[in-house]
Amino acid sequence: MVRYGSDWLLGLSTAWPEAFARRDAWWAAGDARFDELDDALQALGDFAFRTPVPAYKHSMAQALRLRGLLASDEPHPQSPRRPASDREIIATILDRITAAMEATP
């Protein structure tokens, strides 16, 4: 789904814009590493955009916090929240994205 675009692509790309740029460059170049990175990004999207879908914003904040880009992953007080236990799963997915981005051809 992230390969062909969707309604949630912009929300998902907030977690790691550089990963999407790398993925797209590899896709354009026909680089086989594209598939592994695309699959990892898809995993993040599948996890973040589960029901209740509006809570994806908290998932993205958790991802940005885990990447060291936010001081807090607290969402707006009226926004749906994800459980703190999601951080561990998101961290695992982020590790997978990192590994895919560092892969050599």
Image (cartoon, rainbow, N blue to C red):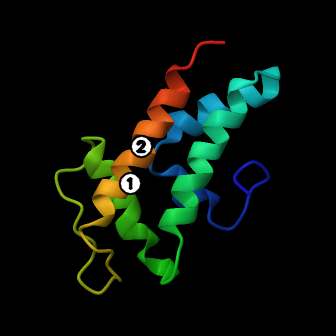
Residue 43, how many percent across, how many down? 56, 54
How far is disc 2 from disc 1 in space, using C-alphas?
Answer: 6 Å
Front-lying residue, 61 or 105 = 105
- Mark 2 neighbour density, 10 Å: few (under 14) some (14–19) many (20 or more): many
Left or right of 7 in this view: 71: left
Rendered image quadrant of residue 84 = bottom left
Tell which of 100 and 55 is nearer to you: 100
For this orientation, the residue located farthest to the top is 105
Residue bearing mark 1: 90
Residue of label 2: 94
Tell me the residue at 59%/57% (across/down).
10
Q: Secondary structure at mark 1?
A: helix
Mark 1 neighbour class, 10 Å CA radius: few under 14, some 14 to 19, many 20 or more? many
Question: In x, y percent, where is residue 91?
Answer: 34, 48
Determine whether the residue tagged by mark 2 lies in a helix, strand or loop.
helix
Residue at point 24% right, 41% down? 68
Is residue 25 something one can see in this rendering?
A: no
Question: In the image, 93: left or right of 9?
Answer: left
Above/below status of 51 relative to 68: below
**Which amino acid, mark 2?**
Leu
Q: Where residue 28 sits in the image (x, y, percent)?
A: 80, 27
Q: Position of residue 86 (x, y in %)?
A: 33, 64
Q: Is residue 51 above or below residue 23?
A: below
For the C terminus, the quadrant is: top right
Q: Name which residue lies at 45% across and 31% down.
A: 98
Horizontal relation, residue 43 to residue 91: left or right: right
Instruction: Specify the quadrant that holds the N terminus.
Output: bottom right
The amino acid type, in three-letter code, at marker 1 is Ile
Residue displayed at 57% across by 44% down: 40
- Whether tag 2 and tag 1 are in contact, CB under 8 A, the answer is yes
Q: Is residue 104 above or below residue 75?
A: above
